Amino acid sequence: MAQATREGLVRGIRRWDLVAVAINAIIGAGIFGLPSRAFALVGPYSLIAFIVCAIVVALIILCFAEVGSRFDSTGGPYLYAREAFGSAVGFEVGWLMWLARLTAFAANCNLLVDYLGFFWAPATTHYWRELIIVVVVGSLATVNIIGVRDAARVTNVFTVGTLIPIILFIGAGLFFINSQNYTLADRPSPGYTAFSSSVLMLIYAYSGFEMAAIPAGEVRNPRRDLPLALLTAISVVALLYITIQFICIGTLPGLATSQRPLADASGIFLGSDGGAIISAGVIVSIVGNLNVIVLAGSRLPFAMSERGELPAIIGATHNRFRTPHVSILITAAVVLGLTLGSTFARQVNLSVIARLLSYGVTCAALLVFRGRLTAPPAMFKAPAGVAVAIAALLLAAWLLSNSSFLDARDSAIAAGVGLLIYFVYRSTRKTRSEAAISPDQNVLE
């Protein structure tokens, strides 16, 4: 059995487990619904939007790969921000990342119920829906409490289950392409706003990779393995996503109005069973993604507690399983409430904005660490790292500038709540610490 770390955790995640975590973290529910929404915004230019979004995310991932190769503790973007900019910024990033994980879970779990309704209609009805959500959340929380190796094994299985239907879709769909569907001659070029909005929306499909960085304290060699996992994952996912959009455009005439674009397209070239196969693939993919969200999301409150920014009880580890069971239970309870009281679309935009803000801080951290002589050494150096970080920051700012007023307002409120929690707890902790020191002790000191 692996030895416990100073955090009380076990380094049970191996190199290829981490690759599977990264792939499952990215391929959630977005790719099964966003091809039609992107096409509705910009038509065939949506293929270019997928490529542009892949480039933006690849630049951000290069920054994550370098910064992550400097650390072997739990926290990911929260830890990077804290070390680069101090505890207040670190806490805010950790808070926003936790919210992003919670809202993503709520969005994807609701979509999971919708796809279960494809096979069993009562799944989406009152009571059955709630029961299914409770069972899903409870099962994933249990798996993650029992041990990180069990959570990693579940992720490995679901990664394979996710990729098989996607590869089947691509392998069959490439033989049924109608080249006329890509004609741009009679289509006006999309406006700046529409194209920018489509790329911003696609961030939801491409993001999630940061979840592989969060549980670094449970990875056997995170400084070496994280860059490999991130770069492998974005290479695989970008190729799959761009090809999926290419096939959807080339095979599905009604793509703009399709609610289940991959299922509808596969129904054309795979027959009546095609929709069922892809729908099953969606279910497998979403469950795998939800498992990674619980694994990574629960480690953020744990990491903040470890550094004295949340109550110590949240940083407790299970005596037998060596997992942060209190943080897992808290995360599971909150996502259960959010999922029961929300829908897929309601949670997507807040999740995207929270992620982009934390991504920007990590990119800025690369610049700070490169200029700091006392920074932990990097085991991976991003090519043209400074230029890559600046480009990533500019692109993230471009995408954020296309957020709607309501989404920006909700994000600002969420960020403000995080700062309030940080300063209130810090003040309370300071007051208790001062009260615990007697006058005699002060004199002796």
Image: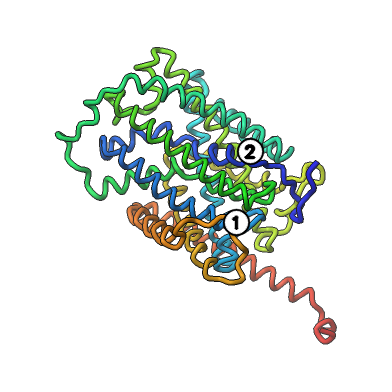
Q: Quadrant of the C terminus?
A: bottom right
Q: Is residue 312 left or right of residue 371?
A: right
Residue under numbered circle 1: 379
Numbered disc 1: secondary structure: loop
Badge 2 or badge 1: first in the primary sequence: 2
Q: Position of residue 132 (x, y in %)?
A: 58, 28
Q: Position of residue 169 (x, y in %)?
A: 42, 23
Q: Residue furthest top?
A: 272
The residue carrying pointer 1 sits among few (fewer than 14), some (14 to 19) or many (20 or more) residues within 10 Å by Cα, namely some
Q: Position of residue 130 (x, y in %)?
A: 56, 31
Q: Quadrant of residue 22?
A: top right
Numbered marks: total: 2
Q: Nearer the viewer, residue 136 or 374?
A: 374
| Rendered residue at 59%/48% (across/down) | 226
The residue carrying pointer 2 sits among few (fewer than 14), some (14 to 19) or many (20 or more) residues within 10 Å by Cα, namely many
Q: Nearer the viewer, residue 171 or 259?
A: 171
| Rendered residue at 27%/24% (across/down) | 253
Q: Is residue 45 left or right of residue 170?
A: left
Q: Amino acid at mark 2?
A: Asp
| Rendered residue at 61%/41% (across/down) | 18
Q: Is residue 32 left or right of residue 39?
A: right
Q: Quadrant of the N terminus?
A: top right
- For discs 2 and 1, the disc positioned in front in the rendered view: 1
Q: Are marks 2 and 1 in contact (CB under 8 Å)?
A: no
- Disc assigned to residue 106: none
Residue under numbered circle 2: 17
Q: Nearer the viewer, residue 143 or 266?
A: 266
